[in-house]
């Protein structure tokens, strides 16, 4: 692991942020873990208790839809037992001074509950269901479970509105375009181990200021262009937000 000072080896590090600067945030599981959401990987991660093949693939859904629904129902109930942390709230507060777009790998709604308004969910949303007959039919769950027999208006079973392993990421091209137009890119709470989302961080233009916030800075090729802050999001993001305003 490595940690660098805020401006180390980055010729753009001291570039300022004006009120018209477009801030793009790429958020991963780490920021939600600070609120108490269990991550998939790492110590105590969900994949230590469940096999991906049993609950989070199209094949798992075909074999045992009730088991897959149960896995996501439990996660959805847990979601409403936790709250956004200071990192989520700091990102939401940036909207008072800048245009901000959040691209998240997370399926929780903590960014929304913190007050952010422009959010792209790469991997879907835990608090929504969608039709198994028409992907365009998406329904708000408001914390409710999905059960066998719950159907869309076409009469087809509802499924979690999440991207399972082996499925395409439908919002990926849109996310790539957003990152390519960033003036400031903040990457928070990711280990750069989930692809293709991990590639997004390296698509920002050369003029953009790039900041990585994570308690452990991974040894990932290309991070020399980033200011690396080896701290939790709840501690680092409020300070970073204030610094952006001052610039």
Image (cartoon, rainbow, N blue to C red):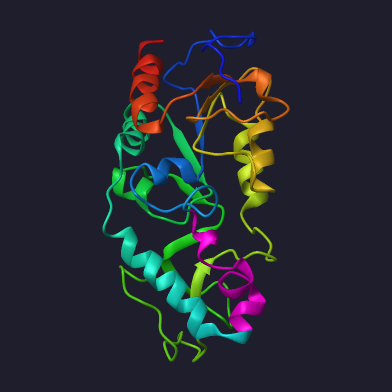
Give 115 or 236, whichever is nearer the viewer: 236
| Camera sees residue 70 | yes
Question: What is the tally of numbered marks visible in this picture?
Answer: 0
Q: Residue 225: give x, y in percent of width and height.
A: 66, 19
Tell me the quarter of the picture where residue 228 sits.
top right
Q: Position of residue 39 (x, y in %)?
A: 47, 52
Q: Residue at x 33, y 31 (%)?
A: 90
Relative to 18, does residue 98 appear above or below in the rendering? below
Q: Image height check: is 133 above or below 190?
A: below
Q: Position of residue 71 (x, y in %)?
A: 46, 72
Is the C terminus in the top left, top right, bottom left or bottom right quadrant?
A: top left
Q: Main secondary structure of the magenta part?
A: helix
Above or below, comparing residue 232 to residue 19 in the picture: below
Task: Say which residue appears at 55% left-offset and 9% top-offset.
Answer: 7
Residue nearest the observer in this picture, 205 or 229: 229
The x, y position of residue 240, in whole percent, is: 40, 20
Q: Is residue 218 left or right of residue 189?
A: right
The relative height of residue 91 versus residue 129 in the rendered view (above or below) is: above
Q: Residue at x 49, y 31 (%)?
A: 214
Is residue 138 visible to us here? no
The segment highlighted magenta reads 45-62
Rendered image quadrant of residue 89? top left
Residue at the image point whose x is 33% and y is 62% from the top: 78
Q: Is residue 59 magenta?
A: yes
What is the quadrant of the N terminus in the image? top right
Residue 168 horizontal side relative to residue 67, left or right: right
């Amino acid at each position: 692991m490595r940690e660098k000072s805020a401006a180390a080896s980055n010729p753009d590090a001291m570039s300022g942020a004006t009120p018209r600067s477009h801030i793009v945030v790429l958020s991963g599981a780490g920021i939600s873990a600070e609120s108490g959401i269990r991550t998939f990987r790492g110590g105590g991660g969900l994949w230590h208790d469940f096999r991906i093949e049993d609950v989070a693939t199209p094949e798992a859904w075909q074999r045992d839809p009730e088991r897959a629904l149960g896995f996501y129902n439990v996660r959805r109930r847990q979601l409403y037992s936790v709250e956004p942390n200071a990192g989520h709230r700091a990102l939401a507060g940036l909207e008072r001074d800048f245009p901000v777009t959040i691209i998240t790998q997370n399926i929780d709604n903590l960014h929304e509950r913190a007050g952010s308004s422009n959010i792209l969910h790469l991997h879907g949303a835990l608090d929504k269901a969608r039709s198994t007959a028409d992907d365009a039919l998406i329904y708000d769950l408001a914390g409710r479970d999905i059960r066998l027999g719950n159907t869309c208006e076409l009469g087809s079973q509802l499924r979690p509105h999440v991207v399972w392993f082996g499925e395409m990421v439908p919002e990926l091209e849109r996310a790539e375009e957003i990152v390519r137009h960033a003036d400031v890119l903040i990457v928070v709470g990711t280990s750069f181990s989930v692809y293709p989302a991990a590639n997004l961080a390296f698509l920002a233009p050369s003029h953009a200021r790039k900041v990585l916030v994570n308690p452990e800075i991974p040894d990932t090729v290309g991070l020399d262009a980033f200011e690396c802050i080896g701290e939790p999001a709840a501690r680092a993001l409020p300070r970073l937000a204030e610094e952006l305003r001052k610039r």
